[in-house]
Amino acid sequence: MKHLFCGLLGWLMLGHPGMSCAEQHEHAQGKAVYDDNCAHCHGYEGDGQGYAFENVFPKPRDFTSGMFKIRTTPTGEEPTLEDLYNIISRGMPGTTMPAWEKVLTEEQRREVSIYLERYYREDEDEEDEEDEEDEEDEEDEEDE
């Protein structure tokens, strides 16, 4: 039964076939919480184009850009999971981003953090794959 559940979950998440069953479950949970609570501003694709986009200022963060203002890492580097968790928990004063710590459980906030991290981790993985393909193409050309 467990294998059937993992297989079904994996099939539903075809974009993430390499994830373990636990990772798939965590991702699905984070996506569900995100879709219910965050997507109306940040969009279902994480692009900051939710249906409330027109009515909020400043505009919601576009997670697909990999650009994050509030983080403990140096400029140009991605935030840590803890950075994401803290923003979700505390909100962003001076914006329409609310604090979710009294609305969502700690586990839900962590799941959403993990879900959001995938937006920029996937981009890094794709760039790494493209770099490897370019290097292989260059090696093939040199061999000819």
Image: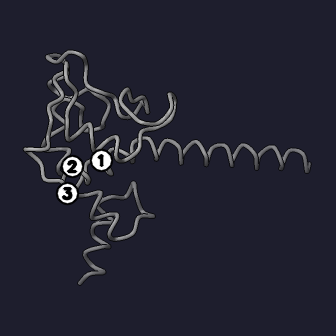
Q: Relative to residue 134, is residue 69 drawn left or right?
A: left
Which residue extends farthest left?
103
- Residue 119 image point, x, y percent: 39, 42
Q: Count the marks.
A: 3
Q: Residue at x 32, y 63 (%)?
A: 24
Instruction: Tell me if residue 74 comes above or below residue 58 in the rendering.
Output: below
SS of the residue under disc 2: helix
Q: Residue at x 28, y 66 (%)?
A: 9
- Residue 40 image point, x, y percent: 15, 32
- 122 or 93: nearer the viewer: 93
**Amino acid under label 2?**
Arg
The reply to whether the C-beta atoms of the residues labelled 2 and 3 are less than 8 Å apart is: yes
Q: Which residue is mark 3?
A: 107
Q: Residue at x 32, y 31 (%)?
A: 47
- 139 or 47: nearer the viewer: 47
**Amino acid under label 3?**
Glu
Instruction: Tell me if residue 17 comes above or below residue 42 in the rendering.
Output: below
Q: Relative to residue 111, is residue 126 drawn left or right?
A: right
The label shown at residue 98 is none
Q: Residue at x 92, y 48 (%)?
A: 144
First reached walking from the N terminus: tag 1 or tag 3: 3
Q: Which residue is mark 1?
A: 113
Q: Quadrant of the N terminus?
A: bottom left
Q: Which residue is mark 2?
A: 109
SS of the residue under disc 1: helix
- 35 or 133: nearer the viewer: 35
- Residue 131 image point, x, y percent: 67, 43
Name the quadrant containing residue 130: top right
The reply to whether the C-beta atoms of the residues labelled 1 and 2 are less than 8 Å apart is: yes
